[in-house]
Amino acid sequence: MKSDYGVLIDKLRDCHEIIVCGHVNPDPDCIGTMLALDQAFAGKSKGWRLVMDEPVPSYLDYLDGIDRFITSDALDIRPQKVLLVDCSEPERCGSWLPPLIEQYQPQLYCLDHHLSNEFVGDGMVLETDAAASGEIAAVLLEKAGIEIDTAIATQLYTAIVGDTGCFRYTNTTPRTLRIGADLLAKHIDVEQIRIRLFESHSYTNMQMIRVAFENMQVELNGQLCYMIIDHQSMLDAGAASGDCDNIVSNTLTLSGVKIGLLFEEYPDMVKVSMRCRNGYRVDHLAQSFGGGGHLLASGCRIKASLEQAKTEVLAAARQLLQAQ
Ligand SMILES: [Mn+2]
């Protein structure tokens, strides 16, 4: 469907009750953008509900409104409107959402920057050139004439910094930097944001990094690197899925690696995170296993044993590398 700022602004402005959802495995972009939209549009309205069934990462607890998140079983409003943030498919928000949409047929809105977006609904802003959903939200608020205060600027800057790796990744455009500069002018605490996002590993996270490196394997003349975090090691360390976030990025820091993978083993599934260097793309790779994401950073969840998931994904990754 057509991307239109005006439509989404009108809909959100008149919206007294809405369910705002983000994707599973929530990241700073998803959380920061959800909070910024809530703060900017909901104001004193009591009818906005930010729903996230998975734990909101604790390192984001400096964000204003972080206690606004509820789980789907605590929903207390009629689902008449639903806004998807940083994703376009209800399935990406968790298994609770599709049946609710099926039952209540709410109006659907979307704010997203993913290439894989095939959203159909009642209003959408999609900019695949935007580095982050937070970047789109900043433009949206400007177009809506809503003033960005320090709290909102902190939420949006967190979102953008998260998806650009502190403005280092190739998704960073001149506009990203201009918007970043405008947010910076709102007297936000960039030192805190950088430390919380990039320099505050928990001890359990550090233990998971160690496990991942211990289980590192390299193939195809050093072009394919993968790491494994087995379930027993997670249990031993008392680690949760969030303790394994971003570990996959270490695979690409090995010189010569084109595609990097991280396998996280859970009792009922295997989570696979994928990264690659420019010239390759892992979004299709993730999609072929029911996942999604960006060209250079994607992921999926496979209902299979670790061995089976490894066999299938590695075969596909090898094929991708050998096709080049
Ligand atoms: Mn994003």
Image (cartoon, grey):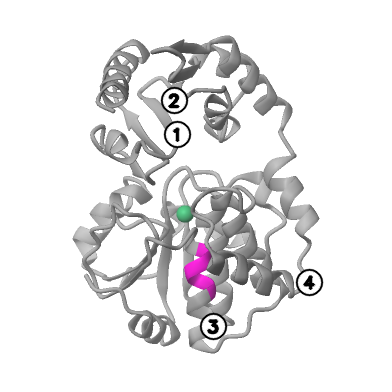
Amino acid type, residue under disc 4 in the picture: His
Marker disc for residue 187: 4
Q: In the rendered structure, are the residues bearing label 4 and label 1 in contact, judged by CB atoms less than 8 Å apart? A: no
Which residue appears at 27% of the width and 17% of the height?
315
Against 307, residue 299 (above or below) is below
> According to the image, label 3 marks what residue?
142
The reply to whether dot 4 and dot 2 touch (C-beta < 8 Å) is no
Answer above or below: position of 203 versus 191.
Answer: above
From the image, give the main secondary structure of the stretch colored magenta: helix
- Element type at mark 4: loop
115 versus 68 height, above or below = above
* Viewport quadrant of the C terminus: top left
Q: Which residue is mark 1?
A: 275
The structure residue drawn at horizontal position 40% and vertical position 67%, both measured from the top left corner, is 19
Q: Position of residue 313 (x, y in %)?
A: 31, 22
Cα–Cα gap, marks 3 and 4? 18 Å
Q: Which mark is residue 237?
A: none
Question: In this figure, which residue is indicated by the disc labeled 2?
Answer: 261
Q: Which residues are magenta?
A: 134-138
Q: Residues within 10 Å of mark 4 (few under 14, many from 20)?
A: few
Q: Specify whether 239 is left or right of 98.
A: right
Residue 226: x %, y % from top left: 46, 19
Q: CA distance from mark 4 to mark 2?
A: 38 Å
Structural distance between the alpha carbons of marks 4 and 1: 34 Å
Question: Which tag, 2 or 3, sits closer to the chain's start?
Answer: 3
Determine whether label 2 and label 1 are within 8 Å by CB: yes
Label 2: how many residues lie within 10 Å, few (<14), some (14-19) or many (20+)? many
**Secondary structure type for disc 1:** strand
